[in-house]
Image (tube, rainbow, N blue to C red):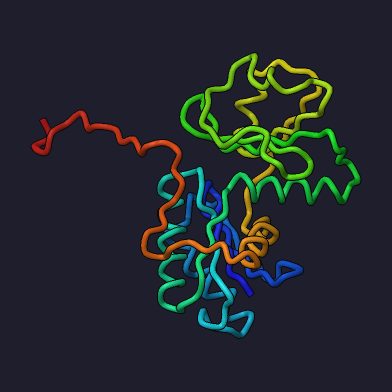
Amino acid sequence: MILCIETATSLCSVALCDKSRVTALRESDENRSHASSLTIFIMEILKEAGINAGDLDAVAVSKGPGSYTGLRIGVSVAKGIAYAASIPLIGVETLLSMFYGFTESAKENNNIMATDLFCPVIDARRMEVYYSVYNAACNKIKDIRAEIMRKDSFRDLSESSRLFVFGDGAAKCKEVIARKNIFFDGNFRTSASFMLNPVYKAFNSQCFENVAYFEPFYLKNFLTTKSVKNILGK
């Protein structure tokens, strides 16, 4: 079994997966509770399954892009488990697991066509989003990038293909993009349960991260604001 951790957005999510399904899931989007909830969720899931970390085949973590703080928390915990339990560490692109989550749902409704395009989007700063574009076969049409959405965004993609834009950055896109045959789902959220397929593909290929040197994929540098007061309060 593989433990999957997702903390790239406001949702703190942990799933326990075997090769065919998600066997347990814990998640919360309450007040960005990653630091306080993540280890509790992990302990609850392992206890429910009656196993210890050392019984896992691997631990997987969503590696970004996304929230700087959320990614650091998730990756730090995953590395700690991998090191302590001597199990492999798997890093999964956040946007890729979003693609799997969205398309699995669409397949259940028999709505996917071979010409469809899929754009997972994560809210970034101001009018920026993190996104990539995939076709129905999970081939990446546009690589991961941070970009300010404009009226002509995605004009390089054929309007004969349906374009599905989904994730917590979809609302930003919907406000400005003018394109035919585009559909937005701003209610779609990331989840550790979406990591099952890419995680086992990586596991079967033995595509593991170096526990000592693995870092999140931030895409952009972390920015801090400078206090208007000095240390003396003047």
Residue 193 locus on image (x, y percent):
67, 59
- Where does the image place residue 133, in percent across and percent down from the top left? 67, 35
Q: As drawn, is 96 to the left or to the right of 228?
A: right
Residue at 63% x, 54% y: name it: 191
The residue under the point 77% across, 25% down is 182
Q: Position of residue 118 (x, y in %)?
A: 73, 36
- Seen at 54% across and 31% down, the residue is 129
View extreme (left): residue: 232
Q: Residue at x 64, y 75 (%)?
A: 1
The answer to whether 62 appears left or right of 226 in the picture is right
Residue farthest to the bottom, as pictured: 50
Q: Nearer the viewer, residue 45 or 75?
A: 75
Up the image or down, 135 lies above or below 183; here it is below
Residue 70: x and y in percent read 45, 51
How many discs appear? Answer: 0
Q: Nearer the viewer, residue 192 or 225?
A: 192
- Quadrant assignment, res 57: bottom right
Q: Nearer the viewer, residue 233 or 7?
A: 7
User: Split into 4 quadrants, where in the image is the C terminus?
Assistant: top left
Q: Residue furthest front?
A: 205
Describe residue 24's horizontal placement relative to residue 94 as left or right. right
Residue 128 against residue 214 in the figure, above or below: above
Residue 107 is left or right of residue 74, and the answer is: right
